[in-house]
């Protein structure tokens, strides 16, 4: 069985890639994808820990909470993508660009 | 009968209102006729009061019209006191007043302010009647002030004439101000009376003093001395007599009515009315008698040195008022009232006659001007037209009242001459004219006192009587005998009948007035004494042949002396023969004992100096400049400068401005964090999360 630390390491790598993508990319779609990557790295960490700490032979709600949380995150991520893509469409309609650096009117 | 009494004031008040409303329209002479009728109607009411008293046993009556002031203990009604004393005064005021009103119709004819004159005259009658008919001291005071006001208005009636165009106005002011000094005394007397007796009504006050007077002599003395101060102002006694000669600036009917017959006797009326209080203040009585006698002496001597026909009469009036005051001071109230009445007759007569003389002289001057003669006098018109030539410089200075400008008017004004002689004989105290009887009664009172001050008073009054006869003789000889000394005198002519009839009426009264109070040895004598007796406590005086003889001899001697000086060799020049024989003394008399100058130096100049000091040094320099400007204003400015500059600007403003500046500075720096780039925010979130996580990690 692959040790849990491997999963956690992969999750951390994915999270850093996602965060870096959010910070350095300018294309809004790519930023979204990076955000998804960060969310899914968290999902990975959830299911990895859920598997490690699952008591043997005990099937209960509490035992499955890690997996269930992942479903919630996926749901929220789907909703977020729906709203985010709608925003990107609206921005593109007014700006004819999906470059986030073009949208900085709220600076102080 | 007595309920008619308010009408005595209502009639002149009505006349006054008619003339105020319509006087200008109805004009000359109707305004005068209405005023005279009003005064006459008041006289009728007064006569009815006399009849009423005679038929009800002379019981004093009080007719209350209304409440006036009711505050706490003080209750002052508008009520009329009807007794023999007040009715005597009412008869005098309305009777002589009505005659003078009639005379004034002629005298004031053609005056531009004809109706106004009669408004004032009726107002005077109203005030004087309030004065004599009130049943309390406050009403007396109201009348007292009212007649003072009328006196002021009428002295200054020709306010645009006189020395420098303001001389008459100034004379009015002088009378008013000098009278204020006296009024101050009267007011204080009133306060003391109220303080002691808790009432101002005559009956209450006198009852109080009859019950408690014996134990409060000092209070009675204070009250009566203050009253004497009031009387000295109103009745022109030492030291306040200086206003009356100047009051001659008013029209002559005014001099006759106000400044001879009625108003100036108010002081005597007040003293006689207050006899109960005086009774408990022998010291005051003595003072009053001495003041009266001294005034009679001083004013009589001044009268001998005057040239103005009215001024002689004015000083004579002061002198005669001195007689009355002296009599009142000696407790001889009947003699005082008797002399008051007879003096009212013959002094009104003399003033009106002198007015007739002045009137005649003025007309002579105008007649002369109309003819275009040269010579001593001109009308204003002629003087104006000739002023360029410079040859008639005497014309504008011609004085129609200067006796030196007259002479031989007997020929031109026979009626005036005869009534003048009657008035003079009455004033000089020649038997059987009215003045003899009243003056003799006063002298006898002084004679019978038997104390040292009685003798002093007697001596002063006797000398004053000598002066009286002398200056009246001097006046008669200067005005009516000899030869005309100026052109206007040659052209003088008799006054109109409307002026002469009142003169004749008064002449008759001056002749028979003595019958009012003949000595008791004459059957049916002492009418006035028995009449006044019902109101005032009277000490009957027996006729004293010796005194009568002395006074007659003195009067005849003085008249004879005046004949020797003025009559035997009539004056032809402007120089008075008396001046030659008396020299400096005459100048002293002519200068009126320099009392005006004395007051000027002793009272007025220091007063002005003090006022100036107070105004400039105290008020302006010290109070305004020093205290207000420098100390208060400057201090405040400095304090305000300190709080505004140092405290407000330096501390408060700097603190809050600094705070605001800091916030602004900080905000403008923080602002830059808000770049608008999503990535910066995301980085911030990341860094924040990492920071918190590391915090948890290290703190664990």
Image (cartoon, coloured by chain):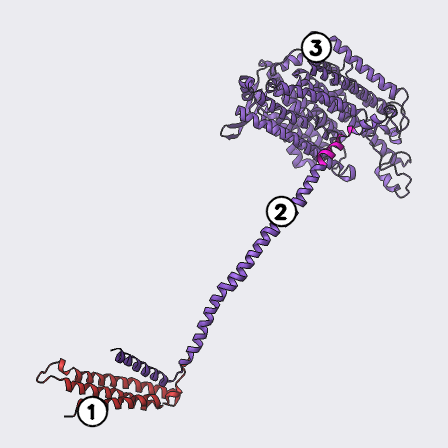
Name the residue: 82% across, 17% down: B558
Q: Which chain is red?
A: A
Tag 1 subunit: A
Specify the segment rendered in magenta.
Answer: B592-604
Tell me the crowding category of disc 3: few under 14, some 14 to 19, or many 20 or more residues within 10 angstroms, Cα based. Answer: many
What percent of the width, then of the height, locates residue B132? 62, 24
Q: Quadrant of residue B378?
A: top right
Name the residue: 74% across, 11% down: B547
Q: Which chain is purple?
A: B
Q: Which residue is mark 1?
A: A6
Q: Which residue is mark 2?
A: B623
Q: Quadrant of the N terminus of chain B?
A: top right
Name the residue: 77% across, 18% down: B463
> Secondary structure beneath disc 3?
loop
Most prominent secondary structure in the magenta stretch? Answer: helix
Image check: B130 left or right of A48?
Answer: right
Residues marked 1 and 3, same chain:
no
What percent of the width, then of the height, locates residue B208? 53, 20
Name the residue: 68% across, 35% down: B23
Tag 2 subunit: B
Of residues B632 and B667, the one nearer the viewer is: B632
Residue B524 in the image: above or below residue B222: above
> Secondary structure beneath disc 1?
helix
Q: Is residue B600 magenta?
A: yes
Image check: A105 left or right of B150?
Answer: left
Say which label, 3 or 2, has the lower sequence index. 3
Residue B519: numbered disc: 3
Q: Is residue B143 magenta?
A: no
Tell me the crowding category of disc 1: few under 14, some 14 to 19, or many 20 or more residues within 10 angstroms, Cα based. Answer: few
């Amino acid at each position: 069985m692959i040790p849990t630390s491997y999963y956690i390491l992969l999750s951390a790598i994915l999270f850093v890639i996602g965060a870096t993508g959010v910070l350095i990319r300018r294309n809004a779609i790519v930023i979204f994808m990076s955000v998804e990557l960060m969310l899914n790295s968290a999902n990975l960490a959830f299911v990895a820990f859920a598997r490690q700490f699952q008591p043997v032979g005990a099937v209960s709600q509490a035992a499955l909470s890690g997996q269930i949380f992942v479903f919630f995150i996926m749901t929220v991520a789907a909703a977020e993508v729906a709203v985010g893509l709608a925003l990107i469409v609206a921005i593109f309609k007014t700006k004819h660009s999906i470059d986030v650096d073009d949208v900085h009117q709220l600076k102080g | 009968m007595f309920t008619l009494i308010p009408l005595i004031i209502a009639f002149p008040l009505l006349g006054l209102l008619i003339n105020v409303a319509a006087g200008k329209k109805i004009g000359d002479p109707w305004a005068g006729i209405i005023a005279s009728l009003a005064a006459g109607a008041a006289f009728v009411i007064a006569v009815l009061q006399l009849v009423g008293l005679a038929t009800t046993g002379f019981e004093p009556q009080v007719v209350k019209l209304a409440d006036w002031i009711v505050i706490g203990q003080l209750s002052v009604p508008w009520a009329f006191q009807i007794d023999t004393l007040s009715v005597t005064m009412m008869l005098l005021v309305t009777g002589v007043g009505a005659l003078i009103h009639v005379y004034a119709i002629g005298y004031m004819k053609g005056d531009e302010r004809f109706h106004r004159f009669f408004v004032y005259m009726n107002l005077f009658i109203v005030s004087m009647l309030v004065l004599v008919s009130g049943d309390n001291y406050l009403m007396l005071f109201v009348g007292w002030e009212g007649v003072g006001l009328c006196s002021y208005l009428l002295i200054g009636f020709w306010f645009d004439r006189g020395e420098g165009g303001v001389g008459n106005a100034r004379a009015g002011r002088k009378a008013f101000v000098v009278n204020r000094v006296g009024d101050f005394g009267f007011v204080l007397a009133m306060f003391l009376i109220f303080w002691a007796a808790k009432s101002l009504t005559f009956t209450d006050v006198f009852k109080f003093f009859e019950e408690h007077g014996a134990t409060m002599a000092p209070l009675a003395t204070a009250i009566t001395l203050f009253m004497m101060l009031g009387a000295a102002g109103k009745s022109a006694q030492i030291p306040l007599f200086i206003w009356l000669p100047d009051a001659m600036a008013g029209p002559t009917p005014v001099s006759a009515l106000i400044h001879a017959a009625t108003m100036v006797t108010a002081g005597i009326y007040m003293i006689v009315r207050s006899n109960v209080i005086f009774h408990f203040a022998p010291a005051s009585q003595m003072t009053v008698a001495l003041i009266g006698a001294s005034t009679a002496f001083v004013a009589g001597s001044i009268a001998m040195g005057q040239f103005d026909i009215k001024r002689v009469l004015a000083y004579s009036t002061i002198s005669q008022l001195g007689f009355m005051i002296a009599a009142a001071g000696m407790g001889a109230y009947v003699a005082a009232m008797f002399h008051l009445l007879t003096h009212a007759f013959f002094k009104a007569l003399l003033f009106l006659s002198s007015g007739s003389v002045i009137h005649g002289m003025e007309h002579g001057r105008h007649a002369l001007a109309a003819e275009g003669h040269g010579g001593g006098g001109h009308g204003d018109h002629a003087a104006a037209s000739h002023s360029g030539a410079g040859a008639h410089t005497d014309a504008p200075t011609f004085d129609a009242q200067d006796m030196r400008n007259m002479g031989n008017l007997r020929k031109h004004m026979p009626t005036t001459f005869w009534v003048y002689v009657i008035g003079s004989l009455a004033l000089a105290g020649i038997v059987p004219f009215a003045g003899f009887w009243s003056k003799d009664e006063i002298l006898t009172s002084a004679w019978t006192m038997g104390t040292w001050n009685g003798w002093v008073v007697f001596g002063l009054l006797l000398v004053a009587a000598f002066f009286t006869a002398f200056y009246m003789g001097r006046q008669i000889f200067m005005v009516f005998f000899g030869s005309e000394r100026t052109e206007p005198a040659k052209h003088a002519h008799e006054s109109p009948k409307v002026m002469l009839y009142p003169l004749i009426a008064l002449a008759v009264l001056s002749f028979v007035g003595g019958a009012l109070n003949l000595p008791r040895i004459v059957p049916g004598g002492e009418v006035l004494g028995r009449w006044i007796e019902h109101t005032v406590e009277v000490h009957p005086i027996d006729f004293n042949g010796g005194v009568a003889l002395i006074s007659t001899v003195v009067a005849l001697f003085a008249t004879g002396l005046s004949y020797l000086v003025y009559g035997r060799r009539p004056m032809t020049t402007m120089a008075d023969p008396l001046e030659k024989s008396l020299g400096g003394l005459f100048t002293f008399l002519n200068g009126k004992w320099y009392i005006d100058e004395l007051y000027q130096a002793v009272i007025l100049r220091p007063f002005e100096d003090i006022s100036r000091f107070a105004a400039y040094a105290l008020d302006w320099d010290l109070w305004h400049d020093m205290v207000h400007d420098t100390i208060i204003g400057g201090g405040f400015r400095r304090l305000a400068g300190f709080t505004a500059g140092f405290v407000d600007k330096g501390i408060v403003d700097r603190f809050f401005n600094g705070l605001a500046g800091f916030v602004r500075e900080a905000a403008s720096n923080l602002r830059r964090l808000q770049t608008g780039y999503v990535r910066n925010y995301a980085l911030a979130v990341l860094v924040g999360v990492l920071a918190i996580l590391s915090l948890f990690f290290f703190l664990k």
